[in-house]
């Protein structure tokens, strides 16, 4: 029907947009083994590289230290002909609570990790928000800038901070030259240096999940809030923040969990009078060669981390449920 | 034949007066119908080089349902967004109830918008969504609760108050969105394609509910839609938009029966358009010679245009009478062959090929269930119409 002759009809349009018929055909698997392979691979990976090492470490943590090779007593011992004795040595765990060193290291690690996470969130949220709201071209540039540091060695980047922070380093020299200070400020071997190092290193892990979340937010929701009389700050507090909660939690855990066990940054930049638990762990293993105590430290640290991970899992589960 | 038509003339004119009366009734339902409430003056919005809204001036009365009707890219949504305050006009201004809206941010305007996507807050319950706007006003908790409950009663969503948006159907979400905007008691309520996301049956039903709620609360509605049926049912007046400009403002009957341009005639409903030359222009009638039609079109009212000017005669398909019996005369009559028939249930559409080669669209209601002698394919038929039926358009 030509447009010249007869104008287009509308009054009787059948169904309109609703007429779209989704013909979802059931998915069939040609090879049932292939499916099991796909599902099984990650489990196999977890078994090999998580479950088995974990059991080994758990086992060592319950044995006695001895000067031998390996440096711990076996857990299972044959007594006589038909008796298998299991010697569970709880002394390693008890020891962790008798020596003040361990408890204070744990608490200090948690404190450093918590404050660093908060700092990352405070810095990362505005950055992620700005990236999510920028034009697609700029967005890619910004994301590239966030990811770029990963192309150089982590160790190298932390060493670079020594050059910046030390007494005759770049920052102190610059401040003295500018006449702001007369004597160099001690920044190395302080909490400040540790926070700088951790926040600097882990900031991308906060920004990226936050960005991924914020980028999906519908601008209409913000408009709707404004339309209903909410000032921009109220809109942010009541709409943007609650909706970005999964991103906040994912980013926070990605920073918090590795930060608790962080070894390199506090070793290079941090205090010498207060160790973080990662350093204690490595000292027990390599300096003291006390594998059972080191294992106990590792196991306890794992439980400190498992709690937040489980909380995260629960939250994510609920979030996914809420969306469907 | 002219005599026969003359007798029908009185009839159709009577009918058109009736339509006008119906429109007047529609407007009269609202109190203060004549009072101008929203005034848009020379409003222009440019995005770079693109002019989305071009020098639009418009008055909307208090308590009416005003529909902005246009295709995609006609600027209707941009106009609505400027009313809401989401877009800043490049020029011109908007006054609501005498108050200049220039420079007033969305969150301080006495208007509320219902978004096409509804934009319900997914992390809040129905109740939470509806209460959100009132909480911003700092009202006491009890009053908020009462007003939320009241409005949820009106939209019949009280029993779903504790649900989250994802637990609701499309129609229910639409009601929540409506309630969320209405609970603020806005001076003007803006609706962006309010029914587009609903299926056809629900849409028809909701249209009337929307009108009922609007009458009950007396809020001024400005509705944006691309669906002419929706506009026809909802609106007391319609503003047809094209390329950022308002091309015609009028009641649904005005727009349909008295379109002022070819665009409006073509956009609203379907129409047969015949290009021709004005050969006789008297105060009480005109004659148009149309080679495209192959006959003289006689129209029983005058127009003001120069003789010899190119004009277009627009005839609605339902106003053309189709029959097997030859009709005598050489004016307003054309012979043709039926090429296509579309049976729609309530009516049938016939596409008739006339000697000039043009296809003419004719609709005819299916009055009788058994119609053995229903006009069939390839039959020769005569088409005729009343001299009041063609609309003569000069642009």
Image (cartoon, helix red, strand yellow):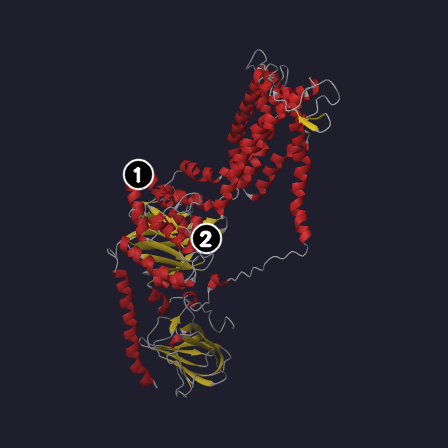
Q: Position of residue B9 (x, y in %)?
A: 30, 79
Q: In the current view of this chain or complex, which residue is farthest to the left?
A: B31
Chain name for mark 1: B
- Image point (73%, 27%), residue name: A81
Distance (Cα) linking label 2 and label 1: 42 Å
Foreground residue among A47 and A212: A47
Q: Is residue B238 visible?
A: no
Q: Secondary structure at mark 1?
A: helix
Q: Position of residue B295 (x, y in %)?
A: 43, 82
Q: In the current view of this chain or complex, which residue is farthest to the top?
A: A183
Q: Is residue B112 visible?
A: yes
Q: Position of residue B111 (x, y in %)?
A: 34, 47
Q: Where, by quadrant of the figure, is residue B121 drawn?
A: top left
Q: In the rendered image of this protein, does residue A48 appear above or below residue A299? A: below
Pointer 1 residue: B141
Q: Residues within 10 Å of mark 2 (few under 14, many from 20)?
A: many
Q: In the rendered image of this protein, does residue A127 appear above or below residue A25? A: above
Q: Residues within 10 Å of mark 1 (few under 14, many from 20)?
A: few
Report how many numbered discs are placed on residues in the image: 2
Q: In the current view of this chain or complex, which residue is farthest to the right?
A: A69
- Numbered mark located on residue B52 in the image: 2
| Horizontal arrangement in the rendering, residue A157 relative to residue B323 (left or right) | right
Q: In the current view of this chain or complex, which residue is farthest to the front?
A: A81
| Horizontal arrangement in the rendering, residue B40 relative to residue B358 (left or right) | left
């Amino acid at each position: 029907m030509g447009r010249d002759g007869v104008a287009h009809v509308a009054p009787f349009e059948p169904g309109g947009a609703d007429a779209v018929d989704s013909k979802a055909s059931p998915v069939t698997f040609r090879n049932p083994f292939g499916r099991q392979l796909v599902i099984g691979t990650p489990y196999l990976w977890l078994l090999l590289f998580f479950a088995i090492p974990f059991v080994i470490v758990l086992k060592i943590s319950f044995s006695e230290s001895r000067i031998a090779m390996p440096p711990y007593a076996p857990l299972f011992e044959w007594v006589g002909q038909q008796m298998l004795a299991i010697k569970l040595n709880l002394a390693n765990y008890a020891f962790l609570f008798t020596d003040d060193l361990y408890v204070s290291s744990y608490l200090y690690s948690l404190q450093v990790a918590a404050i660093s996470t908060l700092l990352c969130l405070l810095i990362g949220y505005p950055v992620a928000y700005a990236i999510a709201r920028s034009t697609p071209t700029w967005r890619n540039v910004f994301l590239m800038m966030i990811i770029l540091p990963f192309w150089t060695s982590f160790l190298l980047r932390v060493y670079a901070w020594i050059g910046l922070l030390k007494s005759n380093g770049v920052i102190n020299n610059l401040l003295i030259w500018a006449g702001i200070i007369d004597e160099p400020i001690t920044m190395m071997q302080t909490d400040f240096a540790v926070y700088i190092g951790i926040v600097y290193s882990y900031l991308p892990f906060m920004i990226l999940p936050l960005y991924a979340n914020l980028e999906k937010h519908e601008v209409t929701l913000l408009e709707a809030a404004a339309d209903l009389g909410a000032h921009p700050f109220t809109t942010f507090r009541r709409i943007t923040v609650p909706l970005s909660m999964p991103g906040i939690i994912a980013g926070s855990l990605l920073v918090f969990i590795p930060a608790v066990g962080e070894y390199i940054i506090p070793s290079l930049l941090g205090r010498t009078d207060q160790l973080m638990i990662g350093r204690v762990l490595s000292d027990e293993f390599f300096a003291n060669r006390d594998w059972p105590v080191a294992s106990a430290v590792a196991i306890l640290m794992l439980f400190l981390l498992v709690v937040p991970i489980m909380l995260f899992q629960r939250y994510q589960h609920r979030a996914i449920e809420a969306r469907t | 034949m002219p005599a026969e038509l003359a007798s029908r003339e009185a009839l159709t004119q009577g009918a058109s007066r009736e339509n006008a009366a119906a429109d007047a009734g529609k407007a009269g339902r609202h109190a203060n119908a004549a009072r101008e409430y929203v005034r848009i003056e020379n409003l222009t919005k440019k995005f770079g080089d693109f002019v989305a809204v071009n020098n639009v001036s418009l008055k909307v009365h208090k308590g009416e349902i005003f529909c902005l009707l246009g295709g995609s890219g006609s600027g209707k949504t941009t106009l609505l967004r400027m009313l809401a305050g989401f877009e800043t006009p490049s020029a011109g201004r908007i006054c609501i109830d005498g108050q200049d809206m220039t420079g007033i941010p969305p969150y301080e305007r006495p208007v509320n918008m219902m978004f096409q996507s509804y934009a319900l807050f997914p992390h809040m319950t129905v109740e939470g969504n509806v209460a959100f706007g009132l909480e911003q006003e700092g009202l006491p908790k009890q009053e908020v609760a009462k007003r939320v409950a009241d409005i949820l009663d009106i939209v019949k969503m009280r029993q779903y108050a504790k649900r989250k948006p994802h637990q609701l159907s499309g129609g229910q979400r639409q009601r929540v969105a409506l309630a969320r905007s209405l609970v603020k008691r806005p001076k003007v309520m803006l609706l962006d394609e309010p029914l587009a996301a609903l299926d056809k049956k629900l849409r028809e039903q909701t249209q009337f509910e929307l009108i009922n709620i609007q009458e009950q609360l007396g809020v001024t509605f400005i509705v944006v839609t691309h669906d002419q049926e929706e506009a026809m049912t909802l609106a007391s007046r319609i503003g047809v938009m094209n390329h950022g400009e308002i091309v015609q403002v009028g009641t649904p009957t005005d727009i349909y029966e008295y379109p002022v341009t070819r665009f409006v005639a073509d956009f609203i409903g379907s129409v047969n358009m015949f290009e021709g030359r004005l050969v006789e222009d008297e105060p009480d009638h005109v004659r148009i010679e149309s080679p495209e039609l192959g006959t003289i079109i006689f129209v029983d009212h005058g127009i003001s245009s120069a003789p010899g000017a190119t004009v277009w005669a627009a005839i609605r398909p339902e106003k053309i009478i189709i029959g097997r019996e030859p009709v005598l005369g050489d004016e307003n009559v054309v012979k043709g062959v039926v090429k296509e028939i579309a049976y729609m249930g309530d009516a049938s559409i016939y596409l008739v090929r006339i000697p000039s080669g043009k296809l003419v669209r004719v609709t005819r209601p299916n009055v009788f269930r058994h119609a053995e002698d229903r006009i069939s394919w390839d039959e020769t038929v005569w088409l005729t119409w009343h001299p009041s039926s063609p609309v003569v358009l000069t642009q």
